[in-house]
Amino acid sequence: MATIVVVEDEKELNDIMCMYLRDAGHTVFGCLNVNEAYTAMRGRIVDLVISDIMMPGTDGFEFAARLRQLDGHLPIIFVTARDDMASKRHGFRTGVDDYMVKPIELDELELRVEALLRRAGIEESQVLKVGGLELDAGAMSAQWDGNPVELTVREFNILYKMLSYPGRVFSRGQLMDEFWGQDADNNLRVADVYITHLRQKFADCPYFSILTVRGLGYKAVPAR
């Protein structure tokens, strides 16, 4: 199933939401603040984020804006006590996909999670196949015509992201979104290094190519 990060500073509610979503079959990371969320998200593929707004330190609005800057497709749900229209307007304009006002029904939360995952096209198996290439996000493993390919976590995440949206151009910042909570602007050139490694490891792979789009970034194009 999906990998979900829950950011809620009220520990009891955090535990309840995490337990309920785990019982539904999801892998869930409970975080009490945004810094914990960045740590949980670093180096792994996250399918959906549930966040409060009013939290110590970085609030939900700033957190959602940062996530949306890094990944335009990541589903985000606000679960908050703020039920005023100004907060809802701010949330949706920041980029959240859904907004629930506390107290919430856990059954309704799960329905909304399922709907957003369907809309985002998250496959339950998390196995991405491109010709004879298979990327298993659950096992963080890659196989090419049945033969394992050794990839670092960051190489895997970058390749999985690119092949999940074939033909889409990703900027260096978008490819390096696993530097959650860090100053990604200082690490953009690192993306070039990972792309070089991937091109070397898949130089003879007939199933896809990684192309440079000058001035914009990179895209993965499956073979026709």
Image (cartoon, grey):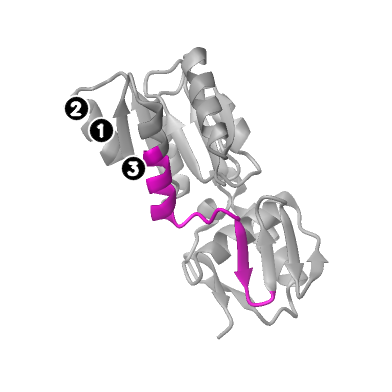
- Residue 64 located left or right of residue 147: left
Residue type, numbered disc 2: Ala
Q: Which residue is mark 3?
A: 97
Report helix, strand or loop for mark 1: helix
Contact, mark 1 vs mark 2 (Cβ under 8 Å): yes
Give above or below for 172 relative to 181. Answer: below
Picture quadrant of residue 88 = top left
**What span is in magenta?**
111-132
Q: Position of residue 8 (x, y in %)?
A: 47, 21
Q: Residue 183 at what x, y percent from top left? A: 56, 38
Is residue 65 in sight in this rendering? Answer: no
Label 1, on which residue?
A: 90
Residue 58 lies in the magenta-colored region: no
Q: Nearer the viewer, residue 65 or 110?
A: 110
Toward the viewer: 30 or 174? 30
Q: Is residue 140 above or below residue 27?
A: below
- Name which residue type carries label 1: His
Structural distance between the alpha carbons of marks 1 and 3:
12 Å
Tell me, for residue 71, which label it has, or none. none
Q: Are marks 3 and 2 in contact (CB under 8 Å)?
A: no
Disc 2 element? helix
Q: Residues within 10 Å of mark 3 (few under 14, many from 20)?
A: some
User: Which quarter shows the C terminus?
Assistant: bottom right
Q: List the residue tagged with mark 2.
A: 86
Q: Residue at 50% across / 13% down in the picture?
A: 12
